[in-house]
Image (cartoon, rainbow, N blue to C red):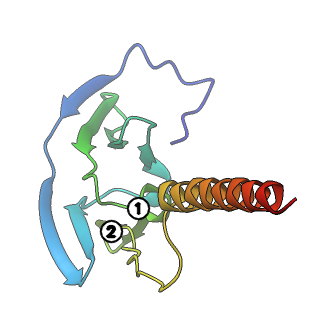
Amino acid sequence: METNAAEPTSNRLYEDFEPYCKWLTKEEGQVTLEIYLKGFKKEQLKVQTDNVGVLTIYGERLVDAASNKWSRFHKEIKISKGCDVNAIRAKFSHGVLSIAMPKEAVVEKHFIYGVGSRKRTAIKVAFGVVVVVALGTCIARLVKLML
């Protein structure tokens, strides 16, 4: 949002309001928040996320220049755990701010025959070493007996 640096902000009379909001599930794996903001322009809005999973939506606009009356709103929404924060997109068109929040892609884990976990591999290697040492000891005893 832009404010004119020469314009004093302390004289402003603010009228806070709660905009009409609607949650939509347009596509599988994505929810969209629509916020109806008649009279606002794109430059008067701000949408951001923080590192603790909160989506902040803020806007203010001049209603009456003569009385320095402004209208503003502020919303904070907790982002769901399954949401891909880096893929959140906002679009403002015809007085409606649409914020699309896609879910993270689920990566399926498949078992591949012959490939075990690290723990299993370590156990197999240890067992193999024990077998080789035991066989080596037996062969050495047999050789000693033959001589």
Residue in view at x 61 percent, y 53 percent: 130
Query: Residue 102 at x, y = what percent?
Result: 35, 70
At 64% from the left edge and 55% from the top edge, which residue is drawn?
134
Q: Quadrant of residue 26?
A: bottom left
When the figure is inspected, residue 146 is found, relative to residue 51, above or below; the finding is below
Task: Say the numbered circle drawn on residue 103.
Answer: 2
Q: In which image quadrant can residue 95 be found? A: bottom left
Q: Are marks 1 and 2 in contact (CB under 8 Å)?
A: yes
Q: Residue furthest toward the top?
A: 10
Quadrant showing the C terminus: bottom right
90 or 139, which is in the foreground?
Answer: 139
Which residue is at 49% across, 70% downward? 116
In this rendering, position of residue 4 left or right of residue 120:
right
According to the image, label 1 marks what residue? 84
Tell me where residue 80 appears, x and y as whole percent.
24, 53
Relative placement, left or right, of 126 versus 109 is right
Residue at 35% over, 41% down: 53
**Amino acid, disc 2:** Lys
Q: Is residue 71 above or below residue 13?
A: below
Label 2 Cα crowd, 10 Å radius (few <14 / some 14-19 / many 20+): some
| Pick the front one: 106 or 31 | 106
Q: Position of residue 41 (x, y in %)?
A: 42, 58
Q: Label 2's element?
A: loop
Tag 1: residue type? Answer: Asp
SS at circle 1: loop
In the figure, residue 135 lies in which quadrant?
A: bottom right
C-alpha span from label 1 to label 2? 5 Å
User: Where residue 6 appears, x then y in whole percent?
Assistant: 62, 23
Q: Residues within 10 Å of mark 1 (few under 14, many from 20)?
A: some
